[in-house]
Amino acid sequence: MLRQALTKNVKPLASRRFLSTSARLMTGETGSGASRPGGLREGDAFTRRETAAEELYIKQEEKAKLLAIREKLKQQKQHIEELDKHMYAAPPTPLPRHEANTT
């Protein structure tokens, strides 16, 4: 009976983990900072630098798109003004008709 109690409580060597970290702590992308106490917001210097570079790229792309939209809007306004000039311009005066003399 003592033998059965000892074998039930002792785990075989194959099931022991030889790593100091558990599988739960190793979840997330490599270098994402998910396993750090502050989470993704408190990464190392490289992670913060990469995040800043991505945000700068996104801002530059959005600025370029906004400038393109403004330029297109300006062109459309000019086109509308030209159409208004043609629409509301005074019609040309007709040329005087020469009536034939029937006498």
Image (spheres, rainbow, N blue to C red):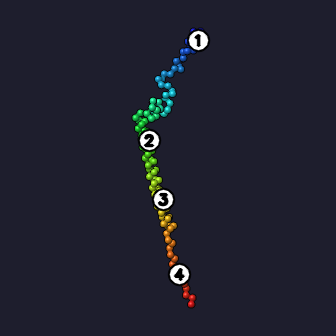
**Residue positioned 46% across, 32% down in the render:** 39
Q: Position of residue 34 (x, y in %)?
A: 47, 32
Which quadrant holds residue 44? top left
Q: Which SS class for mark 3?
A: helix
Residue 22 in view here: yes
- What is the residue that sits farthest to the bottom in this orientation? 103
Of 16 and 40, the residue lying toward us? 40
Q: Which mark is residue 54?
A: 2
Q: Mark 1 points at which residue?
A: 4
Please rate how many residues cluster around mark 4, counting C-alpha atoms within 10 Å: few if below 14, some from 14 to 19, many from 20: few
Q: Earlier in the sequence, mark 3 or mark 1?
A: 1
**Residue positioned 45% across, 30% down in the render:** 37
- What is the residue that sits farthest to the top in this orientation? 1
What is the three-letter code of the residue carrying label 1?
Gln
Residue 30 in view here: no
What is the three-letter code of the residue carrying label 2?
Glu
What is the three-letter code of the residue carrying label 4?
Arg
Q: Name the residue under label 4.
A: 97
What is the three-letter code of the residue carrying label 3?
Gln
Q: Earlier in the sequence, mark 3 or mark 2?
A: 2
Q: Which SS class for mark 2?
A: helix
Say if 34 sits above or below 96 in the image.
above
- Separation of residues labelled 1 and 2 (CA atoms): 61 Å
Q: Mark 3 points at which residue?
A: 76
Q: Which SS class for mark 4?
A: loop
Please rate how many residues cluster around mark 2, counting C-alpha atoms within 10 Å: few if below 14, some from 14 to 19, many from 20: few
Q: Position of residue 49 (x, y in %)?
A: 41, 38
| Circle nearer the viewer, 3 or 2 | 3
Q: Residue 21 carries which label?
A: none
- Separation of residues labelled 3 and 1 (CA atoms): 89 Å
Q: Earlier in the sequence, mark 1 or mark 2?
A: 1
